Amino acid sequence: MAETASKKKSETVAAKAPKTGGEQRPRLLLMDGHSLAYRAFFALPAENFTTATGQPTNAIYGFASMLANTLRDEAPTHFAVAFDVSRKTWRSQEFPDYKANRSKTPDEFKGQVELIGEMLDAMHAVRFAVDGYEADDVIATLATQAEAAGFEVLIVTGDRDSFQLITDHVTVLYPTKGVSELTRFTPEKVAEKYGLTPSQYPDFAALRGDPSDNLPGIPGVGEKTAAKWINQFGSFADLVERAEEVKGKAGQNFRDHLEAVKLNRRLTEMVRDVELPKTVADLERAPYDRTALAMVLDTLEIRNPSLRERLLAVDPGAEEAEQTPVAPGVELDGAVLARRAGPVAGRARQGGPRRRHGRHLAARFGHGHRGRARRGRGSGRLVRPDGPGRGRRERVRDLDRRPRQAEGDAQRQGRHAGLPRARLVGGRRHHGHRPGRLPRQARPPLLRAGRALPGVPGP
């Protein structure tokens, strides 16, 4: 298992660095939107992915997960997604029964493709949908143009007809287990699986037929026989010309269904010259609109932090977004307060039974003696450091805004006036511990970013 995983990883790494003449090629990733969304729909149960308003999101979630993983693993410089418009295409006009055997689109799937489109728009990803053509034809056109322009092309699709597009610089990533595993089909992989070259695949598919597209096969002729004939005669065209040389009952069946097989061959061939509104150069990846993406995910109630992190991690503008400065606030995690600011009160506790995971504001004074800590309990007031308005006292509420009672009064004690440290503590109450910096994970989230709390004036 470890050896297999290592081999797959090395193949992926090797594939990420395509070079020609010592220069790295730009990389175009093309995805078949409908094909992948439909696979995701059946891979994830709709009842587990539904919003409060009843909108299923299983196809959206599965598609987004595959998208994030593929962008991470393949690191494309250019990216686009192609969608089908409807089942009415040039193929259905030529063969009315084309895909006629397919069942009605499930109601739970309807509408999810449009929502996937909104997510892609927020990611500034280009998407195509052309009347009269399938997504396969759009992908074939872009792949052909990109390869001619010196690109390395990766195609993610669940349609095996795309194997005809495979070359030394065009690879098909075919889902083999739901939407979680992709098999990399190269010319060598096609030869290993079918004993054919990618250019021979449509000949092979025409003879075999395709039940999913309702394309009839030849009685008694399966994949092995179809591959044998193609290898024997070289191509479908040569096979048709020498049809009389095919022996046995299978040969007779081939001649009896010759016209149907010729139609299969025309329908299986992908169109490579579809007129598109954008060129390959227009598909370069751009930084996300993070606000719009968050709004889409929030509306769809996709709150899985892992998925969100994976999507944001592959944002071309991630580095710039992370470097955006945060507005300065008051640092409360151990800042030294001015001695002349006046008495600093002790710790305030939350009223009622003590909660194991509650958060409260506490002031720590002295040298950690237990008795002093008790005498130092105060009103929960915090003194601002030196600066405009110094000496002004502000009462700070608990982070979770739960009511609490002040405990003691440091002013009456008078022992700890002017001592320098005030500290925000998360978690349980502390007694007798020396002032010290809490582990980062123990500090409340707002403080990790160094942001001011509500009600606490800035410096």
Image (cartoon, grey):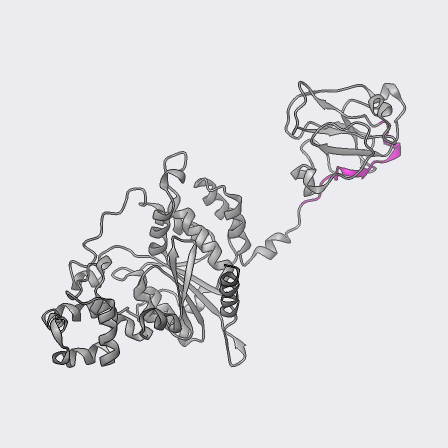
Query: Which quarter of the rendered picture does the C terminus lie within?
Result: top right
Location of residue 212 (image quadrant):
bottom left
Tell me what residue is drawn at x 28 percent, y 69 percent.
Answer: 271
Tell me what residue is drawn at x 75 percent, y 37 percent.
Answer: 332
Q: What stretch is highlighted in magenta?
A: 327-343
Location of residue 434 (image quadrant):
top right
In the rendered image of this protein, does residue 256 appear above or below residue 244? Answer: above
In the rendered image of this protein, does residue 198 appear above or below residue 348? Answer: below
Q: Is residue 121 visible?
A: no
Q: Is residue 300 left or right of residue 326?
A: left
Q: Does the magenta stretch include residue 37?
A: no
Q: Nearer the viewer, residue 26 or 371?
A: 371
Q: Can residue 363 be seen in this view?
A: yes
Image position, residue 406 (x, y; %): 74, 20
Image position, residue 64 (x, y; %): 44, 51
Image position, residue 328 (x, y; %): 71, 44
Q: Does the magenta stretch include residue 341?
A: yes
Location of residue 367 (image quadrant):
top right
